[in-house]
Amino acid sequence: MKSVLFKKIGMGAQPPKRATGGAVGYDVFAYHLQDKKTREHSGDLPFVLLPGKQILIGIGVIMAIPWPTEAEARPRSGMANTFSVELRNSPGTIDPDFRGEAGILLCNKGDEPFTIEKGTRIAQLVFSDVQLPVLVEADVLPKTIRNTGGFGSTGLTDISEGTEAYDRLIHELDVSYMKMAIAASDRSNCARGCPRNAQGKCQLDSRGRLVGQTRKFGCVIVNADNIVGHGFNAQAPGQPLCSEVGCLRDELNIASGTQLEKCRAVHAEQYAFLKMVSSGVGASTRGATMYVTAEPCEICAKMIAGSGIDCLVVLGDVYLNNQIDIVRAACINVRYVHKKDLE
């Protein structure tokens, strides 16, 4: 986790603080008045800000923001909505090489005077990393659908592209990667429910695949359009092949969806996670999309919820269950690809 060094300029100054555990903005507190030209101390608080007037408020803190991070000073919605007091320049940027005291330029756009006390929360800081692209001069630029349309070019009501085009692209990617997940499922050797011959062995077809196999599941994990993990339901390393010794769950008469721990195999999602972390290439699930050929069980749903992925794409119409709510509760986007989409 990144650190930001700060220094108080005097007694009673307060460092920026988040109001709640889920807040991204750090509230800053009024400390004193600043001269708008010299940025020097120009008065103490409290101060009455009259309607139509503005004042520069120092926050009493100097920060050393690490490169390449910036802090944006943004209004607090409570002040704007209740008192009509807003930031004159919003958002204001605090650069990583700035070593002065940040000032908040407040403007009273309401009809009533507003009193600024010492310690009043007057704004919030949001920290974010920035991109510094290399600007390259070119004779010809790539064409776009919008082309040279500028202010107001997209109108007020009708939208011809944009969201629809993006949704089409995402759907095309979902279909493509789902086909890969289905291909991964072909490697499954789960023998549950498969017919056996007179010797008790599972029957195989001419290609050496299990006859009557119904529980074939696959998983593909994609990050930045790269496959970082894939898996299928199969025996854990060191466990005997179920196609050779029979299904343990069948042998114990365990009902489908129950006592999931009593199985020689790992699920496709678990196998994909294991293959990813054991690959040694440093792949991450943070911001990734997972493609699965059936809704996950409760155990896998909890693993997915804590994995940091952004999206879970499921093959619809296959082993649907209520465990998908565990994934949605973790604010993971769930999308479905249906069999008709794969035709």
Image: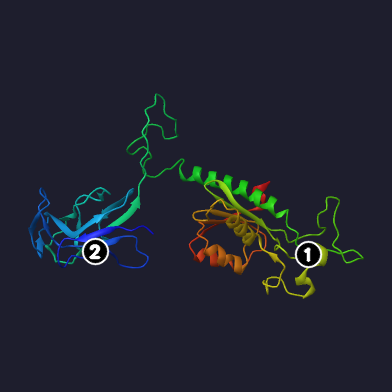
Name the image quarter holding residue 249.
bottom right
Q: Where is residue 329 in the image (x, y as percent from the top left)?
A: 50, 66
Task: Name the residue beneath numbered marker 1.
Answer: 242
Image x and y of residue 12, in percent: 16, 68
Q: Quadrant of residue 291?
A: bottom right
Residue type, mark 1 in image: Cys
Q: In this view, does 48 lie to the left or right of 207?
A: left
**Closer to the camera in the image, 211 or 79:** 211
Answer yes or no: is residue 218 visible. Answer: no
Horizontal side of residue 206 vs 109, given as left or right: right
**Callouts 2 and 1 close, C-beta under 8 Å:** no
Give the spatial CA distance, label 2 vs label 1. 62 Å
Residue 149 at what x, y percent from top left?
37, 34
Q: In this view, does 53 lie above or below 329?
A: above
Residue type marked 2: Pro
Give the residue at mark 2.
15
User: Please, what secondary structure does the residue beneath circle 2 have?
Assistant: loop
Q: Who comes first in sequence, dot 2 or dot 1?
A: 2
Figure quadrant of residue 292: bottom right
User: Which quadrant is home to the N terminus?
Assistant: bottom left
What is the residue that sits farthest to the top in this orientation? 139
Element class at badge 1: helix
- Residue in the picture at 63% in, 50% down: 178
Q: Quick one: which residue is furthest to the left in this view?
A: 43
